[in-house]
Image (cartoon, helix red, strand yellow):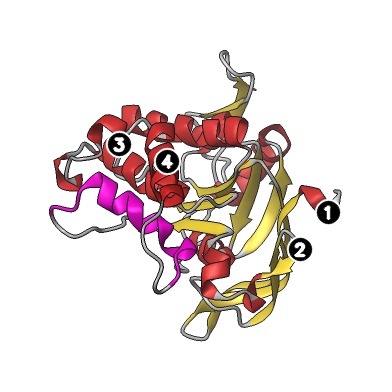
């Protein structure tokens, strides 16, 4: 893979919680300008990997580079101008308006004494426009639907004007209509804006439909990486999720569509108790 095509590269990565490694010696390359899905069962290390890529979780050993720059050496604001992170279940103060939330995305670009300028205003306006939130800019977050709130948070990350977005389970607790709304938005950001988007998902078929590149994890190890067709096979799904599946082409997109078989007597037992 050419160097300019790499968003993240991890070598010998060790990270975890309380001195217990979840990722242990992980080597990984994530392509630039793609919709990348981190997929795997509970406890596989998806969220740990995403948090480590965003430097929300310290690295015990190894190194992570973002577009050929070691992230450990970057000052916090410089990193935030490169990578925007949306954690799972973000919380905002009660009554906060959408436009005020989005304005927080400009923090990495502002100096201690610098005031709000025309570029800040334009960046926020564009972020609201990209997410279809312009008409809701003056609404409080707690007056919005789940899908609208998630789009507001994504607007904040877009106001950072980074080339890379990391999102931890952005569709959790949303109904199917709002899940599709959010995933379609992220897909457009990749296709139309050239963003590198890395997302933790649980739904195999959503990963297959929207993702360009899938990282399949199990117990902190990479089991498979590549396109949905390369990664989502009956063999890998049996090994990782312990289920027997039939793989057929999605009639709309041609992506692999995973259908669990009714008879699961041949599936391997699979249990993981480590934190994600």
Along the line of sight, the residue nearer the viewer: 65 or 224: 65
- Which residue does the image show at 65% across and 36% down from the upper left? 212
Q: Earlier in the sequence, mark 3 or mark 2?
A: 2
Residue at the far bottom in the pictured view? 19
Q: Residues within 10 Å of mark 4 (few under 14, many from 20)?
A: many
Marks 1 and 2 in Cβ contact (< 8 Å): yes
Q: Position of residue 93 (x, y in %)?
A: 18, 60
Pointer 3 with pointer 2, Cβ within 8 A: no
Q: Are marks 1 and 4 in contact (CB under 8 Å)?
A: no
- The earlier-in-sequence mark between 1 and 3 is 1
Q: Which residue lies at the image location 35% right of the left edge and 48% below the top edge?
A: 153
> Which residue range is magenta in the image?
95-111
| Mark 1 and mark 4: Cα distance apart in space | 29 Å
Comparing marks 1 and 4, which lies closer to the viewer?
A: 4
Residue 63 vertical placement versus 121 (above, below): below
Dot 1, crowdedness within 10 Å: few (<14), some or many (≥20)? few
Q: Separation of disc 1 and disc 3 at Cα?
A: 36 Å
Which callout, 4 or 2, points at the residue further toward the start of the chain?
A: 2
Image mark for residue 3: 1
- Left/right placement of residue 251 relative to residue 128 reads right
Q: Residue furthest top?
A: 251
Under circle 3, the secondary element is helix
Residue 127 badge: 4
Q: Is 267 or 253 nearer to us in this picture?
A: 253
Residue for badge 2: 68
Q: Secondary structure at mark 1?
A: helix
Q: Is residue 104 magenta?
A: yes
* Residue 224 seen by the camera: yes
Tell us which disc is closer to us: 1 or 3. 1
Which residue lies most toward the right here? Answer: 2
Q: Which residue is mark 3?
A: 147
Element marked by disc 2: loop
């Amino acid at each position: 893979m050419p160097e300019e095509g790499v968003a993240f590269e991890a070598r010998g990565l060790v990270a975890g919680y309380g001195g217990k490694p979840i990722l242990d010696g992980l080597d990984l390359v994530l392509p630039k300008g793609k919709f990348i899905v981190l997929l795997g069962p509970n406890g596989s290390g998806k969220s740990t990997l995403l948090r480590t890529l965003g430097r929300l979780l310290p690295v015990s050993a190894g190194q992570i580079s973002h577009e050929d720059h070691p992230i450990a050496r970057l000052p916090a604001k410089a990193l935030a101008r490169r990578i925007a992170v949306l954690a799972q279940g973000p919380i905002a103060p009660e009554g906060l308006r959408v436009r005020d939330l989005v304005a927080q995305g400009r923090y990495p670009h502002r100096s201690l004494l610098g005031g709000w300028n025309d570029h800040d205003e334009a960046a926020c306006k564009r972020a609201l426009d990209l997410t279809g939130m312009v008409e809701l800019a003056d609404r409080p977050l707690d007056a919005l639907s789940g899908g609208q709130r998630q789009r507001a948070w994504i607007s904040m990350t877009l106001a950072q004007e980074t080339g890379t977005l990391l999102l931890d389970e952005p569709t959790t607790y949303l109904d199917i209509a709002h899940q599709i709304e959010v995933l379609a938005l992220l897909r457009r950001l990749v296709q139309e804006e050239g963003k590198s988007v890395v997302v933790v998902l649980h739904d195999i078929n959503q990963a297959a439909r929207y993702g360009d590149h899938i990282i399949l994890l199990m117990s902190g190890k990479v089991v498979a990486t590549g396109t949905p067709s390369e990664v989502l096979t009956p063999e890998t799904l049996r090994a990782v999720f312990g289920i027997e599946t039939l793989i057929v082409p999605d009639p709309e997109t041609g992506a692999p569509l995973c259908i669990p078989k009714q008879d699961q007597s041949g599936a391997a037992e699979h249990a993981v108790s480590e934190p994600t």
